[in-house]
């Protein structure tokens, strides 16, 4: 269950309402952190990812003695203080050089974590591509290529796909202008071989490579109705190997995936809408007893009035018969 905090004043009440769960959630904010030992390549990679999410991101330059998989309480603290549900932690060691740890939180608690091992030789930063940069706030198109992302069983690649979508998603909207589609993020995964045991193996160098590329979308005249679309590499260029992962807790994941009932439109029984948009309702009634049905009251239909008329007709007939039966008197004729 979510914790309940009582506000002390109006200002804290507004802050709690801003952080409260909503039917349409705010865009997720990302927080960039670095460890005590962080190589320059890792810092450049964090800077390039920060440039792509600059509108909803914060970056700290101070060194932090954090080991996410040993003790993640510090990450939960940073998430709570900065109201960020995505954290990217950069570190470097002899065993795990150029490591970026993606972390997601729910209710300021650690939900899941995944390590991305960056290949320093193939890395190209954003500044090495002399192209027109995409304005801040643009939402990208995302393409995931590879059978590893389509696995029915949750693994490191499906988690990486979910995390990257959350990172580049931005603000949700029903409609988008075609002119706003300025760049595309393509993530490909090499086909796993029999010799590679996957990202869960002890040797991360044997795992399939995950390649992240960013391209600028350019439309040019084609002489037809539809324009000709060209892609130009925008940068950065990153190759990753997936390392350690922490799967989410079932109870916390169920709470995070729960949707409010207020946003769902309830279907009403026996009510439909026709092609013209008119609402049609169907009413089911039981068997009616028509013997007790009350009709319109009229004096001419009363039973007492009918009996009285019949009696009067009988009396008139009796008087007529009696008059006919009486003997006629003879008139006297004067002589």
Image (tube, rainbow, N blue to C red):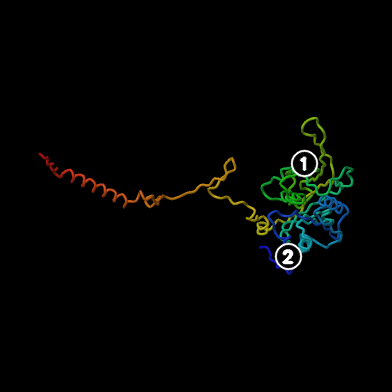
* Farthest-out residue, bottom: 8
Numbered label attached to residue 302: none
Q: Give neighbour class at mark 2: few <14, some 14-19, many 20+ (Cα, 10 Å).
A: some
Nearest to the observer: residue 304 or residue 137: 304
User: Residue visible at 83% across and 42% down?
Assistant: 216
Of callouts 1 and 2, the N-terminal one: 2
Nearest to the observer: residue 258 or residue 114: 258
Nearest to the observer: residue 330 or residue 24: 330
> How far is the residue under mark 1 from the one under mark 2?
40 Å
* Farthest-out residue, top: 223
* Farthest-out residue, front: 335
Report whether residue 189 is seen: no
Residue bearing mark 2: 13
Q: Residue 186 location, x and y as percent?
A: 78, 43
Q: Is residue 37 left or right of residue 292?
A: right
User: Residue visible at 67% across and 55% down?
Assistant: 257
Residue at disc 2, secondary structure:
helix
Residue 4, quarter of picture? bottom right
* Farthest-out residue, left: 335
Report whether residue 61 is seen: yes
Residue bearing mark 1: 178
Q: Residue 146 location, x and y as percent?
A: 73, 42
Nearest to the observer: residue 73 or residue 307: 307
Residue at disc 1, secondary structure:
helix
Q: Give neighbour class at mark 1: few <14, some 14-19, many 20+ (Cα, 10 Å).
A: few
Q: Is residue 62 left or right of residue 277?
A: right
């Amino acid at each position: 269950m979510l914790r309940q905090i009582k506000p002390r004043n109006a200002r804290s009440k507004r802050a709690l309402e801003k952080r409260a769960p909503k039917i349409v959630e705010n865009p997720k904010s990302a927080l960039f952190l670095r460890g005590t030992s962080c190589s320059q390549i890792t810092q450049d990679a964090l800077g390039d990812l920060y440039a792509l999410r600059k509108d909803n991101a914060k970056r700290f330059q101070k060194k932090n003695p954090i080991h996410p998989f040993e003790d993640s309480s510090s990450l939960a603290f940073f998430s709570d203080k900065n109201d960020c549900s995505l954290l990217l932690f950069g570190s470097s060691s002899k065993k795990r050089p150029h490591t970026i740890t993606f972390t997601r939180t729910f209710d300021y608690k650690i939900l899941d974590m995944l390590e991305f091992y960056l290949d320093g030789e193939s890395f190209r930063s954003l500044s090495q591509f002399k192209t027109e940069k995409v304005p801040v706030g643009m939402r990208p198109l995302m393409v995931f290529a590879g059978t590893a992302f389509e696995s029915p069983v949750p693994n490191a690649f499906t988690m990486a796909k979910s995390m990257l979508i959350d990172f580049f998603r931005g603000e949700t909207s029903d409609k988008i202008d075609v002119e706003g589609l300025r760049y595309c993020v393509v993530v490909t995964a090499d086909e796993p071989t029999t010799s590679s045991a996957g990202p869960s193996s002890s040797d991360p160098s044997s795992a399939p490579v995950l390649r992240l590329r960013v391209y600028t979308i350019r439309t040019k005249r084609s002489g037809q109705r539809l324009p000709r679309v060209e892609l130009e590499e925008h940068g950065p260029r990153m190759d990753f190997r997936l390392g350690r992962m922490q799967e989410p807790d079932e109870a916390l994941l169920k709470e995070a995936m729960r949707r409010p009932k207020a946003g769902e439109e309830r279907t009403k029984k026996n009510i439909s809408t026709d092609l013209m948009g008119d609402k049609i309702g169907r009413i089911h009634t039981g068997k009616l007893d028509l013997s007790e049905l009350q009709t319109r009251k009229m004096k001419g239909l009363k039973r007492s009035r009918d009996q009285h008329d019949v009696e009067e007709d009988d009396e008139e007939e009796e008087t007529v018969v009696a008059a006919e039966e009486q003997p006629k008197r003879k008139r006297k004729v004067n002589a």
